[in-house]
Image (cartoon, helix red, strand yellow):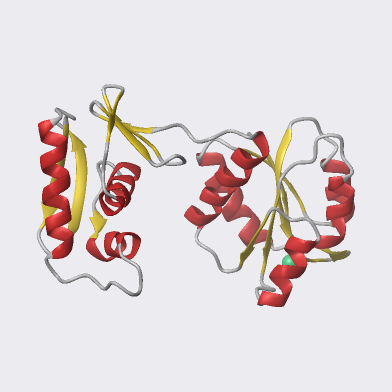
Amino acid sequence: MRILLVEDEIELAAALRGTLNRRGYVVDHVRTLEQARLASQEPGVRAVLLDRRLPDGDGLSLLPFLRAMADPPPVIVLTALGQTVERIEGLDAGADDYLAKPFELDELLARLRAVSRRRAGLTPEPLTLGALSFDAVHREAQIDGRPLQLPRRELALLDLLLRRAGRVVLRETIEAAMFGFDDAPASNTLDSHVSRLRRRLAERGAGVAIHALRGVGYMAKAE
Ligand code: CA
């Protein structure tokens, strides 16, 4: 996938470009609005990462130009201007998303996937592990193609563990996803949810093991 990066900070641009290249994106980097107008006409530009403070003006002024294209690419505005009013300004001007600097590269990558999906009208591929698959958009789990009914919190747990299959997911991360502010979990609640989910998966032959790292978190792996 090809990305137009409009950014005048050379070091940031180089870092972004390196990360995106490693993830298989092709990056066209320009430093000014004028160059961006030209570069956006290149065929195959699928997304634009747009800085606001550019040498020849505010990045937002590029948005109407991009919107007028036959197949406008999604735009993520990347900027140090992170105040709420500025974010609203960016979204109202037609940006698909807005990320305040400094940001985590992983978050940028996730948002890039999200805007690309929305633009393409595609839903993400189901997450799969062993015989288990999970459709994160419709919140449905299946084992060997047959539905697996799970309570809401176990679905949230499964979602996280499958997204990070083979990696440890910290207890705090899981608890933040599983429990709202109003229902702070007792210390053993997470463990009991995990036990129930483990049992259901085993009964149905999901071929998925949930390993515990005591006091740290959990990790899902294919058996
Ligand atoms: Ca700048």
Instruction: Tell which of 11 and 215 is nearer to you.
Output: 215
Lateral position of residue 138 relative to residue 147, left or right? right
Indicate the position of residue 78 as horizontal and vertical percent values.
67, 61
Residue 68 in the image: state x and y as whole percent: 89, 44
Q: Quadrant of ligand 1?
A: bottom right
Rendered-image quadrant of the C terminus: top left
Q: Nearer the viewer, residue 12 or 172?
A: 172
The residue nearer to you, when weighing 138 against 208, is 138
- Residue 10 in the image: above or below residue 1: below
Q: Quadrant of the N terminus?
A: top right
Q: Is residue 137 above or below residue 6?
A: above
Q: Residue at x 47, y 41 (%)?
A: 137
At 72% from the left edge and 76% from the top edge, which residue is drawn? Answer: 85
The residue sitting at 18% across, 30% down in the picture is: 206
Q: Position of residue 135 (x, y in %)?
A: 40, 36
Q: Residue furthest top?
A: 144
